[in-house]
Image: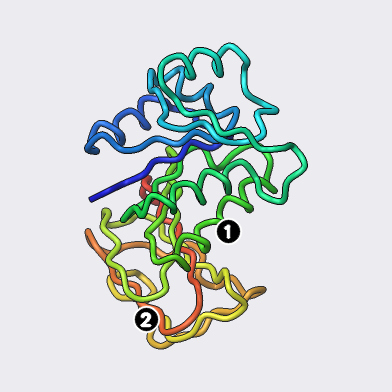
Amino acid sequence: MKRVVIFSGGTIKDPEFIRGKLEDMDTPVVICADGATRHLRSLGIIPSVIIGDMDSIDEQDLEEFGAKGSTILTYPSEKDETDTELALLYALGLSPEEIWIFGALGGRIDHALANITLLVTATKRGVSAKIIDEACEIFIVTGQVTVEGESGQTVSLLPVSSRVTGITINGFEYPLCNAVMETGKPYGISNTLTGDRGTISVAAGYLLVIRYYRKET
C-alpha cells in the first residue's frame, strides 16, 4: 500500500507513540507542514517535502532539512489554504491509497477543526485518510468500514455533512439500523465496541468516526 504521512503543527505529546506507528510502515513518503519540522527533529525523520508559508518554522531546521534532501515548497503568507491543506493537496497529487496525519489536534481549536474537515477533501478524492494522535484516530465513512479495536473502546459518530442517512452499525453497545444523523443532534457520542471489531455503513453523507484507544472504565 502506498501510504503518505503528513505532519501538521499541532500537538504531539508522545513522540514514541508516533515512532511506533511509523516503524510498522514500509518507508512512507513524509510531508511536513511548515513548523511541524519541530516534531520531525525530535523523531529523527527527514521529510520528503516541507510545505507552507514558512512563518512558524525554525530557520535552522529549514536549512538543515534542505541540506539533507528535503524539497522546500514556499507559499505566500496571504493565501486561502492552511499549511496542512497544502500538505494534503500535495499528498493527494501522489495518488496514495492512504494518508495518515499526525500533529493535527491540540493547540488552537480552529486549526483542529479545520484539519478534521480536510478528511472530507481526501474522501471526495477517493483516498482513505485518518488523523492519528496518542488518544484516538479519526476518519470519515461514506460506504462501509470495519472498525478493529478492543471491547470497551469508545467510538463516537458525528455527521460532518448536514445530514447523514442509512447509518447501520453492528458490534457496538448501541446498534443502529438505517438511522439518520443531522448536525445539532449529537446522539452518536460515546458508543462502545462490544468485541474486537464493529461495522459501520452509511448510505449517503459524510460520517465522522472517532475511535479512542483507551477503554471506558
Q: Is residue 211 above or below residue 40?
A: below
Residue shown at 49%/47% (left/top)? 90
- Residue holding disc 1: 117
Which secondary structure, mark 1?
helix
Q: Few, some or many C-alpha atoms within 10 Å of disc 2 (few <14, some 14-19, many ≥20)?
A: some
How far across and how far down the image is residue 2, in percent?
A: 27, 48
Q: In the image, what residue occupies the spot 57% across and 43% down? A: 84
Q: Where does residue 171 sit, x and y in percent of width and height?
A: 28, 70
Judged by depth in the image, the label closer to the viewer, 1 or 2, is 1
Precedes in sequence: disc 1 or disc 2: 1
Which residue: 51% across, 31% down? 50
As displayed, is residue 152 above or below residue 208? above
Question: In the figure, is residue 33 to the left or right of 184?
Answer: left
In the picture shown, does residue 91 fall above or below 151? above
In the drawing, what numbered circle is on residue 153?
none
Mark 1–mark 2 Cα distance, whole angstroms, equals 23 Å
Q: Quadrant of residue 8?
A: top right
Observer-nearest residue: 124 or 149? Answer: 124
Residue underneath mark 2: 168
Q: Amino acid at mark 1?
A: Thr
Give the image location of residue 28, x and y in percent: 30, 38
